[in-house]
């Protein structure tokens, strides 16, 4: 004979287990939102900030085209507007029913979030300001139709993805584990060229060359060489801060990563930014052959270096590759054509 009471109790226990599992999952996702808010300095409505962050960082064919030309005509616009209909519904989603069903109050806290005051260095201010600006504009939009020009204008002005929100990057030695070859550097400092005393002629040339580069005119690769502590690295960082708002981005690469240069350039050649490949304290010992990869990029091959990429390097040595007396004399039998060796290193 069936036991209705026992069956109801069993169903109630099962429902409670599911309810607890849902509560746990919700709290895990809330914790992820709080982590994102801490990392980027978000405040007020974290749900809106999070969705605006997704819009700003998701690279699709549409967002990449908008990065280059802004709002444009085409059938793909309708597909994106359909996506914005869903986005608008999520943006204004009422969490009351979920909170009451699960016995939670976390969503009302997230939508009226007051962050603990902290120094700007702790989070990425550049990302925070842009996402909060986008979030605020989306809050003013009555529907998806009004959201469309806001989003496309954002892509045109700032770009999309990590390149749109960050100014500096590094190369991963383990892209499979890190999930990407090019990773953002969250904090770079706020130094300016005015912080450097002296070296006015050198700073002027550096500014003129970078100015030409960001304006799309012809510009040169740069080598800053001199004694340690003379401001070479600071000059490069100051240049990035000065021209970041005009589309300059910087990718730091170490000499052992030179073999990845072609892969890096392939990822950035069609983006709507000006990229400086930055190599700090660059020099090569006699046995190190990574300079050949760098030389190939500088000189170009069948596929030339794209016009939106330059290489800026610093070094304590004017001649980056160590030479020995045996390269210039006949006292070694290791190399038959020593003049070729000398020319290879000098080039």
Image (spheres, rainbow, N blue to C red):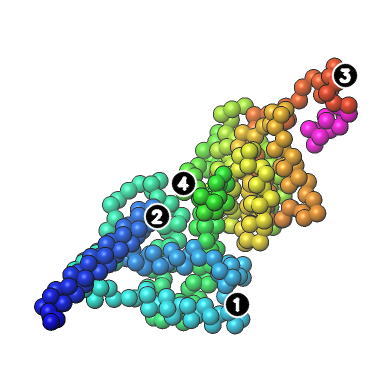
Label 1, label 4: how far apart the Cα atoms are? 34 Å
Instruction: Please name the residue shown 51% across and 50% down the image.
Output: 177
- In magenta segment, residue 3: no
Can the viewer see residue 170 in this picture?
Answer: no
State which tag comes first along the sequence, 2 or 4. Answer: 2
State which tag comes first along the sequence, 4 or 3. Answer: 4
Mark identifier at residue 269: none
* Residue 87 on image: x %, y %: 42, 75
Mark identifier at residue 40: 2
Labels 3 and 2 touching (C-beta < 8 A): no
Can the viewer see residue 154 in this picture?
Answer: yes
Q: Main secondary structure of the magenta part?
A: helix
Instruction: Please name the residue shown 66% across and 52% down the image.
Output: 263
Between 281 and 158, which is closer to the camera in this rendering? 281
Q: Which residue is mark 3?
A: 330
State which tag comes first along the sequence, 3 or 2. Answer: 2
Label 3, label 2: how far apart the Cα atoms are? 61 Å
Label 2, label 4: how far apart the Cα atoms are? 11 Å
Mark 2 or mark 1, which is nearer to you? 2
Q: Which residue is mark 4?
A: 187
Q: Which residues, given as a range, are shown in magenta?
A: 337-347
State which tag comes first along the sequence, 2 or 1. Answer: 2
Furthest toward the top, the residue is: 331
Labels 2 and 1 touching (C-beta < 8 A): no
Label 4, label 3: how far apart the Cα atoms are? 51 Å
Mark 3 or mark 2, which is nearer to you? 3
Locate the N terminus and report the quarter of the image it occupies. bottom left
């Amino acid at each position: 004979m069936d036991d209705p009471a026992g069956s109801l109790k069993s169903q109630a226990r099962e429902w409670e287990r599911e309810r607890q599992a849902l509560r746990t999952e919700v709290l895990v996702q809330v914790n992820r939102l709080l982590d994102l808010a801490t990392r980027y300095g978000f405040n007020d409505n974290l749900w809106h900030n999070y969705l605006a962050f997704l819009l700003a960082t998701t690279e699709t064919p549409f967002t990449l085209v908008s990065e280059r030309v802004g709002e444009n005509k085409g059938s793909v616009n309708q597909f994106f507007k359909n996506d914005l209909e869903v986005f608008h519904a999520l943006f204004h989603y009422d969490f009351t029913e979920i909170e009451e069903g699960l016995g939670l109050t976390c969503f009302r806290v997230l939508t009226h979030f007051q962050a603990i005051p902290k120094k700007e260095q702790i989070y990425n201010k550049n990302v925070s300001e842009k996402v909060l600006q986008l979030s605020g504009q989306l809050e003013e939009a009555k529907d998806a139709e009004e959201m469309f020009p806001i989003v496309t204008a954002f892509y045109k002005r700032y770009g999309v993805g990590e390149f749109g929100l960050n100014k500096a990057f590094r190369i991963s030695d383990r892209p499979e584990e890190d999930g990407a070859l090019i990773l953002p550097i969250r904090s770079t400092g706020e130094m300016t060229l005015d912080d450097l005393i002296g070296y006015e002629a050198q700073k002027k040339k550096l500014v003129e060359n970078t100015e030409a580069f960001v304006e799309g005119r012809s510009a040169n690769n740069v080598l800053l060489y001199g004694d340690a502590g003379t401001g070479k690295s600071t000059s490069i960082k100051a240049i990035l801060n000065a021209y970041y708002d005009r589309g300059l981005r910087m990718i730091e690469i170490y000499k052992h990563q030179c073999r990845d240069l072609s892969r890096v350039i392939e990822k950035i050649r069609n983006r709507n930014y000006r990229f400086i490949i930055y190599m700090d304290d660059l020099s090569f010992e006699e046995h190190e052959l990574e300079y050949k990869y760098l030389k190939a990029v500088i000189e170009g091959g069948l596929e030339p270096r794209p016009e939106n990429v330059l290489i800026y390097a610093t070094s304590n040595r004017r001649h980056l590759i160590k030479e020995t007396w045996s390269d210039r004399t006949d006292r070694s039998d290791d190399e038959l054509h020593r003049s070729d060796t000398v020319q290879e290193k000098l080039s």
